[in-house]
Amino acid sequence: MKIIECVPNFSEGRNEDTFDEIKQALEGVKNCKLLSLEPDSDYNRVVVTLAGNEKGILNGAVAISLAAARNIDMRNHKGEHPRLGAIDVVPFVPVKNVTMEECVKISESFAEIISERLNIPVYLYEAAARRKERKNLSDIRKGEYEALEEKLKDPNWHPDYGTNKFDPKLGAIVTGARFFLIAYNVNIKSRDVKYAKEIGEVLRESGHPKRDANGKVIKINGEVVKVPGRLKSVKAMGVALEKFHFTQVSMNLTNYNITPLHVAFEEVKKEANRLEVEVEGSEIVGLVPLEALIHSGKYYADGRSMDEKSLVDLAIEKLGLSSINYFIKNEKIIDYMI
């Protein structure tokens, strides 16, 4: 059996009625299973994880996207997380017996169907991108929902599917195919978000603008000079979590074989120590592959021989993955759920 994961991110993190309707939309969909639904009120965003075969995952993604579209109005949306629309991003991920190319085709089918049903712009990214400037999600999201109306007037930003007409209620959608992404946040014991932001800038692969002694951004021939970040395949930013009275370095690990969880965690700790603030655990939003936790367990085992369960438990302990919500292995590790 082919298994594809789909991880839609919707711009609603507070309305239980919306979450219920998203769940109900999947009830009649065959060969598609809801693995998790994780809302965050500060981000005002919900991350939904589905798994299924080719037909099931496509039908499931369409069904919950239509449910989200009925319930979310971007004109009323505010949140910490960058977003382009109500159905912000819908990635398809190869898990078992399926290729990246097959997932690209599924994302294209989704883009065609959803753009016709909702009459809104849809962009393709990552492995499905048709233009190099659209490969990176952050480039497509630049300016976010608030700048989308003007962006759509630029011929260079006409969508891959759908209309270039601005829909104030729904905004736009990004879809595509990618490697398994781990949404990973490290907690900083400070309510001042400047520390988390600085750590994110230092570590993320894209780096940050170089500044002179007076703090002014340095440009050469009109181009901003960038300082490369320390960690490859990492996107990062600093965000505030008011309900917990601390901040986070919010990261996307786009390839955990290049930058594993423990490397990201330990590098955040180093930078926090430099800035004289403390790290207190971390969290994984959505699901995580078993392999990623085993990698971290082996690192912290430091040469000791351990079985799978012990390695996973050690990784959970050392990364502080239960610092905000208790990390339930059978609900967070995708291999244990499929």
Image (cartoon, rainbow, N blue to C red):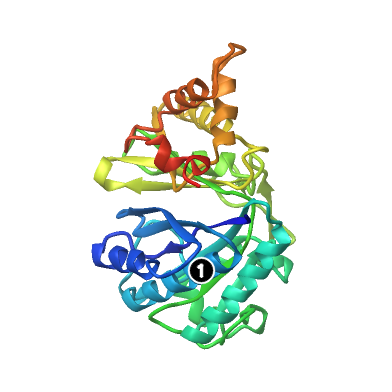
How many labels were placed on the picture? 1
Position of 126 compared to 286: left or right? right
**37 versus 296 height, above or below:** below
Image position, residue 228 (x, y; %):
67, 43
The residue type indicated by label 1 comes to Gly
Query: As displayed, is residue 50 above or below residue 309?
Result: below
> For this rendering, which residue is in front, 21 or 273?
21
Identity of the residue drawn at 34% across and 73% down = 72
SS for dot 1 = loop
Relative depth, front residue between 322 and 197:
322
Tell me the residue that label 1 is attached to.
143
Residue 62 appearing in the image? yes
In the displayed structure, 111 sits above or below 116; it is above
Q: Is residue 222 visible?
A: no
Q: Quadrant of residue 94?
A: bottom right
Q: From this view, report whether residue 216 is shown above or below residue 30.
A: above
Position of residue 205 in the picture relative to residue 171 (left or right): right
Indicate left or right for 221 with 58 as reference: right
Residue 138 in the image: x percent, y percent? 57, 60
Q: Nearer the viewer, residue 138 or 201?
A: 138
Near mark 1 (Cα within 10 A), the count class, few <14, some 14-19 or many ≥20, is some
Q: Residue 146, how many percent across, how many down?
A: 44, 73
Q: Position of residue 154 (x, y in %)?
A: 62, 83
**Which quarter of the figure is the N terminus placed in?**
bottom right
Q: Observer-nearest residue: 56 or 212?
A: 56
Tell me what residue is drawn at x 32 percent, y 53 percent.
42
